[in-house]
Image (cartoon, rainbow, N blue to C red):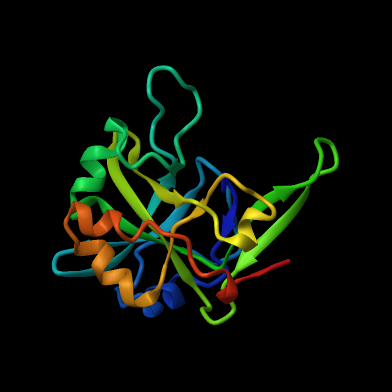
Amino acid sequence: MCNLYRAKRAGAEIAAIFGAAEPSFAYTGEKDFYPKSKAPVVIERDGGRALAEMTWGFPPPPSSKAPVTNVRNLSSPFWRSALASPERRCLVPATEFCEWEGEKGAKVKRWFSVPSLPVFAFAGIWRPTAEGAAFAFLTCEPNPLVAAVHPKAMPVILPPEDYGRWLAADDDGGRALAVPFPSQLMVVD
């Protein structure tokens, strides 16, 4: 699963790309995001978009210790309330995401990006927690490019024309967007 990504643009630039208000926190774009990292996300707030800072990973269910960062089973009761509520949807800005390739002890990072988009967005969900807001992003079956490295899943990358739909759609309309991004529009390094 994707547990490493980047958003290599400053907060003000990310806000401008997504039509969001300027962030109230400093973000330079110089950070790799691992689970439990604070990261920028785009949410709907007061009739417009805002760039918020949240922690990557929902608090785990009682049977687990690690935060839950990827949403694969969209019918799971663990995700149901967040998926059903457009107010709990977010866009997770990214410039590239990583999957590991190779044998244990000799794994290498493979970075996937979308050259035509300086910043793209994963379909995310969020919820308030005692420590502040937390987010996770949806995953789906991988496209052929990602499957060659990671055959289990890939993040749901939304085309820009679907950003508003993801943030506002009813439950079924939102779930319909959980499809692989076209591999011919991506590259891997």
Estimate the x, y position of residue 56 in percent, counting from the top left. 45, 45
Residue 165 position (above or below residue 130) = below
Estimate the x, y position of residue 109 in percent, counting from the top left. 74, 53
In the picture, the quarter occupied by the N terminus is top right
Q: Nearer the viewer, residue 80 or 28?
A: 80
Q: Which residue: 31% across, 32% down?
A: 78
Q: Nearer the viewer, residue 107 or 7?
A: 107
The furthest residue to the bottom: 116
Task: Answer left or right for 91 relative to 148.
Answer: left
Residue 59 position (above or below residue 128) = above
Estimate the x, y position of residue 160 in percent, counting from the top left. 38, 76
Residue 88 position (above or below residue 19) = above
Task: Answer left or right for 135 relative to 28.
Answer: left
Q: Nearer the viewer, residue 126 or 80?
A: 80
Residue 21 visible (yes or no): no
The furthest residue to the right: 106
Residue 165 visible (yes or no): yes
Task: Answer left or right for 90 relative to 99.
Answer: left
The furthest residue to the left: 47
